[in-house]
Image (cartoon, helix red, strand yellow):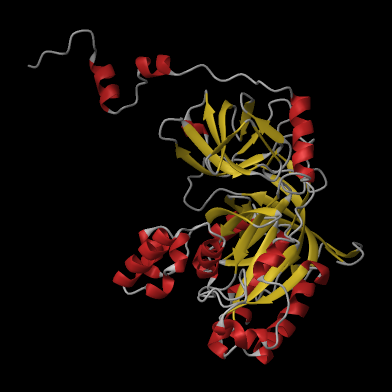
Amino acid sequence: MSTPLRGKDAQSLDLSGLNLMQDDDAVQADEPPPKITIAREKVLEEAKQALQGDSDKRAVNLVVIGHVDAGKSTLMGRLLYELGKMDEKKRVANERASGKIGKSSFSWAWEFDGTSEERERGITMDVASQIMNTPHRQITILDAPGHKDFIPNMISGASQADCALLVVDAATGEFEAGFDRGGQTREHLLLVRSLGVGQVVVAVNKLDQVEWSQARYEEICSLLRPFLVQSGFQPSKTRFVPVGAMAGINLVKREGPEAEPLNVWYKGPTLVDYLDELEPPTRDITAPLRFPISNVFKGQASGTAVVGRVCSGLVQVGERLRVLPGDETAVVRMIDSEGDSLQWAAAGSSVTLYLTSIDPVHLNIGSVLCPPSAVIPLARSFSARIIVFDIQVPITTGASIELFHHSRDVPASITKLIATIDRATGTVIKANPRVLTKSASAEVQITLRTSAYSGPATIVQPIPLEPFSVNKEMGRVLIRRGGETIAAGVVMDILSS
């Protein structure tokens, strides 16, 4: 019989073998949480000045959308190179490596498509983020996937955006494939508009494949314009620009023999000229902090990190925050933006927060960080005003749906059809309708439910959200069913928590 180790019983040995015990030495080695060093009033004053952007560049978040293979990642990779954000050494390395696996046409896209699976398949699967500078703007680019299998990832990217860059493929038959029913061009535009994006720049790409045909460019613009208006985009906030991403034509400049056929008929701004004019929306920095978590990871030496966007209010180093759902709190140890360490971050900033005084198990994608004195409400049931998209199967009471809110998606049901509404006036057309068909505007009750795989005793976890009238960013929802986005809307009232 083996002799047990002195001073340790069998149970503690079992637990230590499973790495379930905390290491006392490691706990003691933790440095004390930082203290707040700047007065709140001073931070508010600094944030107001920064948002007015008199001295610094104004910040905007741009989501890049469009049908699969429209050339989104290629366009953004080439644009970063033209702006000096990608050096020649990196460009050559990407060109050689992509050529080796027979994907040389994707070399520009490799700046964004970083995983081996994305590179092998030649499609974007996750949301990649980069920062680029134009003369008057600091633009955070969110390169979203175009393939319909990855729409949930695209929604996560779009929910962090202020403006959209729609890339369409001008090649014969390709624009139509993306724009006709089932294509992602329509769905992406409806999604970003539903998520509050009001400005869109349309880059008509691959025009070099149709000999820079002005007729083809104008045909695409004439098909898109009415759809954009119908989707809720104002013509004054919509821009069109012809580009050739692979050759870098009309991204930053229009020079050289390759650009001559375009210069014959196009004298307008370049893509960067339009991006430089994007208007940042008004940011609510005086409201309570709302920080939905879009990713959680373990920092190399800096503890647990959460990635997300400050939807309202501001956050500063040393601040204690509540994590909802749950009863846990954490202290902000460090705020990071693209490698720069900040003392504070205000509404509209996409940042990484390094947290201390919390077990990482309590941090989940979709959770919201907020001040303990002004917590965000939790909801199991709420009423919402929705717009139904172009659906084939009508929505009935009790319909099972997937509910998307920021980076969270949960199973839910439409438990009551309260009324159909006139979209223009907001008046009730019919109370308690039997079904909702395509293009209907309606008020409905949505209730969360357990997933099909859960046992009968599983309790439905509420999710953090707010009425749209209180916080626009936290009051938007998307509804999907069977892999298709069927409606989008805004939260009216929270009915039960």
Q: Position of residue 205 (x, y in %)?
A: 59, 78
Determine the residue positioned at 53% across, 30% down: 355
- Image quadrant of residue 135? bottom right
Considering only vertical position in the picture, is 319 above or below 466?
A: above
Q: Residue furthest top?
A: 7
- Image quadrant of residue 206? bottom right
Q: Position of residue 15 (x, y in %)?
A: 30, 23
Is 14 on the left-hand or right-hand side of 451? left
Q: Nearer the viewer, residue 463 or 187?
A: 187
Q: Position of residue 309 (x, y in %)?
A: 63, 44
Is 7 on the left-hand or right-hand side of 67? left
Determine the residue positioned at 75% across, 36% down: 47
So how many labels did they put on this image?
A: 0
Is 392 on the left-hand or right-hand side of 334? right
Q: Nearer the viewer, residue 363 or 305?
A: 305
Q: Quadrant of the N terminus?
A: top left
Q: Quadrant of the C terminus?
A: top right
Determine the residue positioned at 64% across, 25% down: 319
In the rendered image, is residue 343 in sight?
Answer: yes
- Image quadrant of residue 234? bottom right
Determine the residue positioned at 74% across, 71% down: 239
Q: Nearer the viewer, residue 12 or 255?
A: 255
Q: Nearer the viewer, residue 469 or 54?
A: 54
Q: Residue furthest front?
A: 256
In the rendered image, is residue 487 in sight?
Answer: no
Considering only vertical position in the picture, is 432 above or below 305?
A: below
Considering only vertical position in the picture, is 475 above or below 123?
A: above
Q: Position of residue 254 (x, y in %)?
A: 62, 76
